[in-house]
Image (tube, coloured by chain):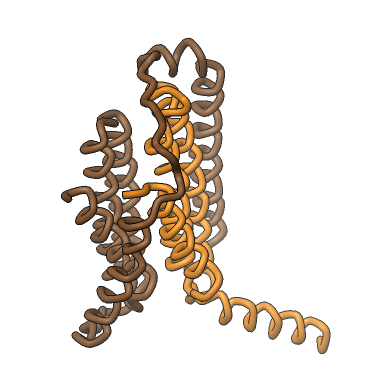
């Protein structure tokens, strides 16, 4: 079994979700999958780095991943409270309508 | 054999996490992805990585379940046909990882322990990451607090 290909498959699924899904929660799930695919390489490609160093890098990658998760979730909550939806298409439409109203006024 | 089965399960749960429409089901599938990844790490001999993956996954999923429950409507039942087709897609996608190989056999180098690598080689990184996480946490608290104040 090859972990590089497994990681690439997970990355591809994550990128597909990131590009096609309109819901912010799905975007977040896609980002998590991409992060999992990336961190998998630190564990599975350790033979060339040394096992301890690979896991040390993994801890740092998890820290970054946690920060990204926190920021996305905060944005998700704020956007949903402000606009009542978490669909990116609806958010764009709402903002466009808002701008048109401002121009007309 | 068990690693292959885990990788098939991993790809299937990743597919379900992306393609299922309801947020709660999607998050449940993501939980499966994290859990299987953690077991895969543990069976590959990276126990620290498995523990960290499990801890981070558990934290993220707890918040995601709350968000999913809060932000979405009552989940509808997933049609059996959709579920089966997603599982089939997952199995198909996992086949290349099982039968193909692009990375050559490398010799395992266990020359350095995890603690040694973390504190002797990456100590500055670890401390700075701690500051970054603290700053982000404070930023999120301020953003949410400002929003709450503004809403009143």
Residue situated in front as seen by the camera: A8 or A70 = A8
Where residue B121 appears, as percent x and y from the top left, is 51, 14
- Quadrant where the C terminus of chain A is found in the figure: bottom right
Relative to A60, residue A71 above or below: below
Q: How many marks?
A: 0
The residue sitting at 39% across, 14% down in the picture is B111
The residue sitting at 22% across, 87% down in the picture is B81
The residue sitting at 29% across, 31% down in the picture is B46
Residue situated in front as seen by the camera: B21 or A105 = B21
Residue situated in front as seen by the camera: B124 or A87 = B124
The residue sitting at 26% across, 79% down in the picture is B74
Relative to B61, residue B41 above or below: above
Rendering quarter of residue B115: top left
Rendering quarter of residue B119: top left
Give the residue at the far left of this rendering: B2
Where residue A45 appears, as percent x and y from the top left, is 43, 36
Residue situated in front as seen by the camera: A22 or A86 = A22
Where residue B131 appears, as percent x and y from the top left, is 54, 27
Q: Which chain comes out orange in the rendered image? A: A
Q: Is residue A73 visible?
A: no
Q: Is residue A79 visible?
A: yes
Q: Which chain comes out brown in the rendered image? A: B
Asked whether, in this view, residue B3 is left or right of residue A10, the answer is left
Where residue B34 appears, as percent x and y from the top left, is 29, 51
């Amino acid at each position: 079994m090859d972990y590089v290909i497994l990681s690439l498959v997970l990355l591809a699924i994550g990128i597909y979700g990131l590009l096609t899904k309109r819901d912010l929660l799905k975007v977040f799930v896609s980002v998590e999958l991409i992060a999992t695919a990336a961190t998998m390489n630190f564990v599975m490609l350790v033979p060339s780095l040394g096992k301890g160093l690979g896991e040390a890098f993994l801890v740092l990658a998890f820290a970054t991943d946690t920060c990204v998760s926190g920021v996305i979730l905060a944005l998700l909550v704020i956007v949903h409270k402000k606009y009542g939806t978490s669909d990116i298409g609806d958010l764009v439409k709402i903002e466009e309508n808002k701008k048109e109203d401002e121009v007309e006024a | 054999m068990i690693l292959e089965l885990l990788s098939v399960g991993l790809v299937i749960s990743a597919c379900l996490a992306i393609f299922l429409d309801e947020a709660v089901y999607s998050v449940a599938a993501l939980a499966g992805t994290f859990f299987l990844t953690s077991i895969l790490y543990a069976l590959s001999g990276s126990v620290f990585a498995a523990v960290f993956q499990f801890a981070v996954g558990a934290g993220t999923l707890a918040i995601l379940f709350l968000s999913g429950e809060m932000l979405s409507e009552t989940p509808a039942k997933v049609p059996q046909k959709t579920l089966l087709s997603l599982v089939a897609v997952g199995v198909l996608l996992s086949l290349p990882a099982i039968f193909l190989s692009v990375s050559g056999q490398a010799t395992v180098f266990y020359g350095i322990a995890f603690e040694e690598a973390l504190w002797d080689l990456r100590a500055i990184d670890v401390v700075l990451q701690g500051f970054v996480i603290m700053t982000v946490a404070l930023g999120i608290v301020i953003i949410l607090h400002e929003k709450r104040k503004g809403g009143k």
